[in-house]
Image (cartoon, rainbow, N blue to C red):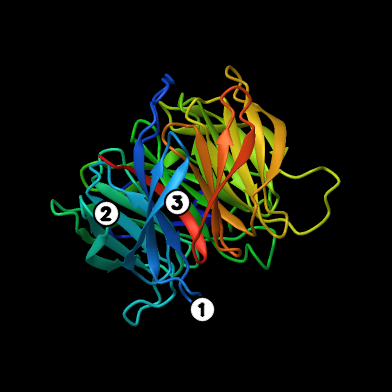
Amino acid sequence: MKISRRTASHIIVGAMLFGSLLALSGPVFAQKTAAQYVIYIGTYTTKQESKGIYAYRFDSGAGKFNEIGLAAESTDPSFLAVHPSGKYLYAVNEVGDFNGQKSGALSAFSIDHKTRKLTLLNQVSTHGAGPCYVSLDSMGRWVLVANYDGGSVATFEVQSDGRLSLVKGFVQHSGSSVDKERQEAPHAHWIGVSPDNRFALAVDLGLDDVLVYKLDPARGSLTPNMPPFAQVKPGSGPRHFAFHPNGKFGYVLSEMATTVTAFSYDAKKGALTAIQTVPTLPKDYSGPTEAAEIVVHRSGKFLYASNRAGVDTITIFSIDPSKGTLKETGRVSTKGRTPRSFAIDPTGAYLLAANQESGNVVVFKIDPSTGALTPTGEEVKVPAPVSVVFLEDK
């Protein structure tokens, strides 16, 4: 399929048909009252003490944990997504071999309403090795996966009982960028849908691109948009993406360059236009760089980005409400090693940082006026935690 000279050089649209991420909060911020939640923590199990996915109850009023325990045994269930119905959870199994194929796996679980434990429904191939991210579209019909080692993205249909179909939509990226060690090939690192559910955006570290696809809500297919991608500076290594709640801006965290690039977003065209790039580390820093996660606060006032590689901090930015531009306002230690991911509770009151190498998830109180983070002293020990997702405990 030819879209443009550059697109044709590094995107191959798979012959398989049929795509998308959880819808983001609306443009108006309303204070959400404290509630009880269940949190599920994805982990790495290979050469680790972890057995799979762990669960805790979390009181968003007090910021306290109550352990549920091991929710399900699973191999390297790194990133998780909860279905909008609250009945199912999906996990990528970040492996390179599945049933004798050079592929990772995607697991579907039912959630027990009383115990909150997980029961495996089925498991399917992701059609690419090393799946590293999973999300759902806003209707809960499609599960989207990014395959890092395979350099591809895929979609799967959610059946009426929560089970997953075989792959429905598939796009194989191709090409490379300037860093011959880390960008020798495509490495899809994140995929999610636009706020209106019309487009799927895929961040590829190996190509230095954010690729935009039209999402077919009936078939789950992914078709390159026009324009088909937005670029960051060559060698940046983009990793994750986050929309602003108002849907007018989007932000890309680049792992290798440790920068955040702000984009304006044309929702009608599905087009991103870069407006600013800022560092997540001090200008005089000269050590190893490895940014990991990016989250925009539900108020739209603050953005957070984590730094690994021995730095182990979260950088805080304020967001200009009219321009979408960023200004750094602070930086805090995550009280652990290698904050691969973090999440903000649905009320916007607390941030939970998952420190992979130190095996702890640490709670920070968020100042609603400044966005500043203060450790509360609350933390739980979890072996090799990777990601945290919330489910309201009704």
Q: Is residue 65 above or below residue 338?
A: above
Nearer to me, 18 or 253 = 253
- At horizontal 24% and vertical 52% (from top left) the residue drawn is 88
Sequence order check: which comes first, mark 2 or mark 1?
A: 1
Q: Are the residues tagged 3 and 1 within 8 Å (C-beta)?
A: no
Cα–Cα gap, marks 3 and 1: 21 Å
Disc ID at residue 388: 3
To which residue does mark 1 refer?
47
Mark 2 residue element: loop
Q: Earlier in the sequence, mark 2 or mark 3?
A: 2
In this view of the protein, can residue 52 be seen by the observer? yes
Q: Residue at x 29, y 54 (%)?
A: 89
Residue closest to the eye, 194 or 91: 91
- Nearest the camera: 345 or 217? 345
Residue 71, picture quadrant:
bottom left
Q: Earlier in the sequence, mark 3 or mark 1?
A: 1
Relative placement, left or right, of 136 versus 43 is left
For marks 2 and 1, give the CA distance: 27 Å
Please give the name of the residue rendered at 68% of the width and 55% of the height, measured from the top-left corner.
Answer: 256
**Real-space CA distance between mark 2 and mark 3, rounded to the nearest whole angstrom:** 15 Å
Is residue 167 among what the camera can see? no
Q: Amino acid at mark 3?
A: Val
Give the labeled residue for mark 2: 116
For badge 1, the amino acid type reads Lys
